[in-house]
Image (cartoon, coloured by chain):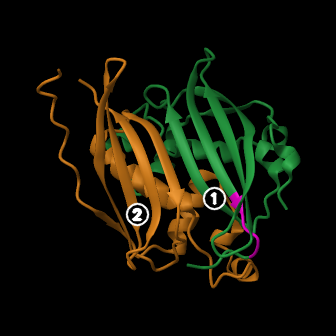
Amino acid sequence: MTTGRAALPPAPGPVVHGPVTRTDFVRYQGASGDMNPIHHDEEYARAAGFPSPFSVGMFQAGLLASWATDWLGAHNVRRFRARFAEQVWPGDTLTCEGEMVGDLEEGGERYVELELRCARQTGGVAVRAWATFAVPR
Amino acid sequence: MADRQALGHTGAPFRLDVERGKVREFARATGSSNPAYLDSDEPPCPPTFLTTQFFWQEGKADAWQRVALDQQRGLHAEQEYVFHGPPPTAGTELTARSTVTEMYTKQGRRGGELTFAVMVTEFRDADGRLVAEARMTGVETGGVPEAS
């Protein structure tokens, strides 16, 4: 039996972003290389049936990834999976949070598993994510 | 309209160098002020950084193009990154290759058929070691996706 596992750093509280703007979307698009016009071109978005451009799902996923790496370390991430649910619109306020749901040993290494959520001000979850981090000894 | 013929298609290999300036730009664009990304000489890739394969996966390397999802009815459903060890740091030269591994349809909750496609990209270092994998799931809806 393993006893006395090292304590993890304390979990950070929720982090709030926004209200998010078209500038946030465009900056993310420029950084990522995904230039789909539906996220910044008003006319294109309307022609596709949307009231305005909406955010890139991967922007919200990135905010969650930042929340998790701030907690458990940039070098320690081993898996990150995001599922996109609700769209995010200009003016939305986003809250990123999560918790540890697993703590395991594999091949002599310790890993923790997280569940993460990025929610809109409506309470609707825009992105759910699952992450695995190695815990250095 | 999604093209089922894309299933199994593998793109040409392409190179992606992990660059310090790109890591900084990406970290800032995703709300991070972590000094591990911003101040280090050799910052690691943020968890979703390899999405920057968009910059490098062009022409014959772009396996996703074959899937031909309608950009106005297409949505990103899910995205996963797996790192086989610490994420690669700035200065690492990665060689990547993408394959369309799955295509399937489901009945949508609001009616209409949804077409899903999955593309897996493998990233190897200069020694040929598999350091990371990306798995992208896209979906094409039957009509204009309803605004939430």
Residue at mark 2? A118
Q: Amino acid at mark 1?
A: His
For the record, the magenta segment spans: B139-143
Residue A103 rendering spot, x and y as whole percentages:
28, 36
The answer to if B141 sits in the magenta stretch is yes
Asked if badge 1 and badge 2 are on a common chain, one would say no
Quadrant in which the N terminus of chain B is drawn = bottom right
Q: Is residue B30 visible?
A: no
The answer to if B21 sits in the magenta stretch is no
What type of secondary structure mainly makes up the magenta span? loop
Q: Residue at x 34, y 41 (%)?
A: A113
Residue B111 rendering spot, x and y as whole percentages:
70, 74
Answer with the quarter of the image where residue A116 lies. bottom left
Closer-to-camera residue (B143/B28): B143
Q: Which mark is residue B76?
A: 1
Q: Is B13 situated left or right of A15 in this image?
A: right
Mark 1 residue element: strand
Report in which chain the residue with disc 2 lies: A
Q: Is residue B80 above or below residue B87?
A: below
Q: Is residue A67 above or below residue A9?
A: below
Q: Is A118 situated left or right of B19 in this image?
A: left
Mark 2 residue element: strand
Residue A11 rendering spot, x and y as whole percentages:
22, 50
Answer with the quarter of the image where residue B9 lies. top right
> In the rendered image of this protein, which colour is used for chain B?
green
| Number of numbered markers | 2
Q: Amino acid at mark 2?
A: Cys
Q: Is the residue marked by circle 1 packed among few (<14), some (14-19), or many (20+) residues within 10 Å?
A: some
Q: Residue furthest top?
A: B127
Report in which chain the residue with disc 1 lies: B
Q: Which chain is orange?
A: A
Q: Is residue B95 visible?
A: yes
